[in-house]
Image: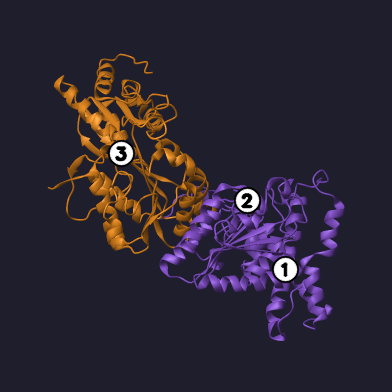
């Protein structure tokens, strides 16, 4: 765990803890909705990777943009989204962020700068880099973070846009969430050489860090965001992390590609929430009781939001051909 | 009225809109000093600078993706895709991203961008630089598709496209860049979804897109000499399509040929013919005929290439047969 700077960061730390708990709680509820057959389709759980989304998004403002992935609930929560609109979207209800038209894999929350999840692996790399190009052309000082997984490093688009981002010094941070698996295949079987070296080949400064350490992630991101705002971008971060669930919620029997012992080890010894919680208590930033109360509050919020979403209306059928074209 | 080339008309439209709206910029390969291989953009970088006329590496999916992201966050990019054939390279960014983002976000995000590209065979450029791929993008909901048939349309449609809040694909026929047409000095826009009746007639309707409008007009001249009055209609945009004007004409003439330079099978001609059959069946005296490019990759040899595309003689021949009540088993 990176060292706490001072007690003046108490509020920031507690918000980071709370946001990580919110993501885990959101995912636990989403998984239950799937298991109880209340959710249409499938979803991809972010559980285990919370420190990545929270560490990064806590270094951003609402004006800063992110692009997200099929495993995107964590990014959405971390960037400021509300449970109610998120659960409504997961259930295809009219009050969802996308009026039920996007679902789990396409949640976008423009009010907080989330340009949307993307169900094409690597599909948002152009969008993120284009957002940064717009910022540079307009003289806007916002930064765009492009979240993607290790699997997306096999897509050609990444190398095309990193080349242009480096040529034009665009304010974009490529955040590679390396959770060790490209769907059902170990990353080492799909990625030759070093991932960070690929960015370095374009002259992009690249970092490899422990994605389970929220303070380390936040500290690095703050520095890189500040440098992006000064025109020193782009940057690349590889964050070592782990996904607790399978590729999607239906990927339950997965021993053919990874062991239960491995999963247990990450959950017991490297869990980002357990680690940060221990840190907060040992540094005297919060007591166990205070953190338990926070957890309970988040759980209640999630339960209320799920109940609300379950009772909410589906969109009227007249909406099916609405929003094909903008006015 | 002054006459300018289609190339000059596109250039004027871009310059006028870039002066009007500072959020517009052009992005693509060799668009700046080179002004594209067809020189359509010559002079723009001198006026607008390299921040707004942006040369990219040869990375079509990359710069298309950049344009989508810039459009989603407040800019109005104009993407220059050097050859229409390269559309296959950018399909994910165009069709999975740009076309769907407004819908998938429940109307919250817009993607106001223009993709300028070209089409057209008989330039001896062979199979990967000659295709007319408008049907591929017209198939995807969320995209608009314009097909200018002259310098006048090229300017008016381009200005409308740039102001549209959706992704718009414009196919310019690369063989028409030097063709001149009267173009007003004063500003004008051509609304999408409004077909242009180029020539009135009572015996048969020739519906033609892009350079096929010239083909249809020449066929109509030949037919007029024989006493057959052909009506020629240019839809100008195939998405949205001005069905009403097409149906009105066909109800009057009771016969129609649809002509487009894309491959005939599963193409633009099939779609329009089908709509006429569905909505004007009882007004028809003959089957609606499709005339597209042959279903072969575009060959290099002039001896072969020239027979792959519709010609005025071919259109006139089919029109005569339809008017005489003969059934046609077109290839």
User: In this picture, is A22 found above or below A99?
Assistant: below
Q: Are marks 2 and 3 in contact (CB under 8 Å)?
A: no
**Which residue in the structure is indicated by mark 2?**
A152
Q: Quadrant of residue A213?
A: bottom right
Instruction: Tell me what residue is drawn at x 79 percent, y 45 percent.
Output: A257
Residue B289 at x, y = what percent?
34, 23
Compute the Cα span from label 2 to label 3.
Answer: 37 Å
Instruction: Tell me what residue is drawn at x 24 percent, y 44 percent.
Output: B6
Label 1: chain letter: A
Horizontal relation, residue B100 to residue B127: left or right: right
Q: Quadrant of residue A296?
A: bottom right
Q: Are marks 1 and 2 in contact (CB under 8 Å)?
A: no
Compute the Cα span from label 3 to label 1.
Answer: 55 Å
Label 3: chain letter: B
User: Is any part of residue B328 visible from this angle?
Assistant: yes
**Which residue in the structure is indicated by mark 3?**
B174
Apparent colour of chain B: orange
User: In this picture, is B192 found above or below B234?
Assistant: below
**Which residue in the structure is indicated by mark 1?**
A20
Apparent colour of chain A: purple
Quadrant for the C terminus of chain A, please.
bottom left
Label 2: chain letter: A
Horizontal relation, residue B196 to residue A179: left or right: left
The colour mode here is by chain
From the image, state whether disc 1 or disc 2 is nearer to you.
2
Q: Are marks 3 and 1 in contact (CB under 8 Å)?
A: no
Depth check: give the residue in front, B308 or A105: B308
């Amino acid at each position: 765990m990176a060292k706490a700077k001072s007690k003046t960061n108490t509020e920031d730390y507690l918000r980071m803890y709370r946001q990580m708990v919110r993501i885990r709680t959101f995912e636990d509820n989403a998984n239950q909705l799937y298991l109880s057959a209340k959710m249409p389709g499938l979803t991809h759980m972010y559980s285990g990777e919370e420190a990545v989304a929270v560490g990064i998004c806590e270094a951003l403002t609402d004006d800063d943009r992110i692009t997200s992935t099929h495993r995107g609930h964590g990014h959405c929560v971390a960037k400021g989204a509300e449970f109610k609109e998120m659960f409504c979207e997961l259930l295809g209800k009219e009050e969802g962020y996308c009026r039920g038209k996007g679902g789990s894999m396409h949640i976008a929350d423009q009010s907080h700068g989330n340009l949307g999840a993307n169900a094409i692996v690597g599909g948002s790399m152009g969008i993120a880099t284009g957002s940064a190009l717009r910022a540079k052309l307009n003289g806007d000082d916002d930064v765009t973070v492009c979240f993607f997984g290790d699997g997306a490093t096999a897509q050609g688009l990444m190398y095309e846009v990193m080349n242009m981002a480096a040529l034009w010094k665009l304010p974009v941070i490529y955040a590679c969430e390396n959770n060790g698996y490209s769907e059902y295949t170990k990353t080492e079987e799909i990625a030759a050489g070093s991932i960070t070296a690929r960015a370095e080949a374009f002259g992009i400064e690249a970092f490899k860090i422990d994605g389970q350490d929220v303070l380390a992630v936040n500290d690095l991101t703050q520095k890189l965001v500040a440098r992006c705002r000064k025109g020193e971008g782009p940057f690349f971060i590889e964050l070592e992390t782990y996904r607790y669930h399978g590729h999607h919620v239906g990927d339950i029997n997965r021993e053919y590609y990874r062991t239960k012992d491995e999963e247990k080890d990450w959950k017991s010894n490297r869990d980002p929430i357990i680690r940060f919680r221990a840190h907060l208590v040992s540094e005297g930033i919060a007591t166990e009781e205070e953190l338990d109360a926070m957890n309970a509050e988040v759980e209640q919020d999630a339960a209320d939001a799920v109940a609300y979403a379950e009772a909410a209306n589906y969109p009227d059928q007249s909406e099916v051909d609405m929003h094909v074209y903008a006015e | 009225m002054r006459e300018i080339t289609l190339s000059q008309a596109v250039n004027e439209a871009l310059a006028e809109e870039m002066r009007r709206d500072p959020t517009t910029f052009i992005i693509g390969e060799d668009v700046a000093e080179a002004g594209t291989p067809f020189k359509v953009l010559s002079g723009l970088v001198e006026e607008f600078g390299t921040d707004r006329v942006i040369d990219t590496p040869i990375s079509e999916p990359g710069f298309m993706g950049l344009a989508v992201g810039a459009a989603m966050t407040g800019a109005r990019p104009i993407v220059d895709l050097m050859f229409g054939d390269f559309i296959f390279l950018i399909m994910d960014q165009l069709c999975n991203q740009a076309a769907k983002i407004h819908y998938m976000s429940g109307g919250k995000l817009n993607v106001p961008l223009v993709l300028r590209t070209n089409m057209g065979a008989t330039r001896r450029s062979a199979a990967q630089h000659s295709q007319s791929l408008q049907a591929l993008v017209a198939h995807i909901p969320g995209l608009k598709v314009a097909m200018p048939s002259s310098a006048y349309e090229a300017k008016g449609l381009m200005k409308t496209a740039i102001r549209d809040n959706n992704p718009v694909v414009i196919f310019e026929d690369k063989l028409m860049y030097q063709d001149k047409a009267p173009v007003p000095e004063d500003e004008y826009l051509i609304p999408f979804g409004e077909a242009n009746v180029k020539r009135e007639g009572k015996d048969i309707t020739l519906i033609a897109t892009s350079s096929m409008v010239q083909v249809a007009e020449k066929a109509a001249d030949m037919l007029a000499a024989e006493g057959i009055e052909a009506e020629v209609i240019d839809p100008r945009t195939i998405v949205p399509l001005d069905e009403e004007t097409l149906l009105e004409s066909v109800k009057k003439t009771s016969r129609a040929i649809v002509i487009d330079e894309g491959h005939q099978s599963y193409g633009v001609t099939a779609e329009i013919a089908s709509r006429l059959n569905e909505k004007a069946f009882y007004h028809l005296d003959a089957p609606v005929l499709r005339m597209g490019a042959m279903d072969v990759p575009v060959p290099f040899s002039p001896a072969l290439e020239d027979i792959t595309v519709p010609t005025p003689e071919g259109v006139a021949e089919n029109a005569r047969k339809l008017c005489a009540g003969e059934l046609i088993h077109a290839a």
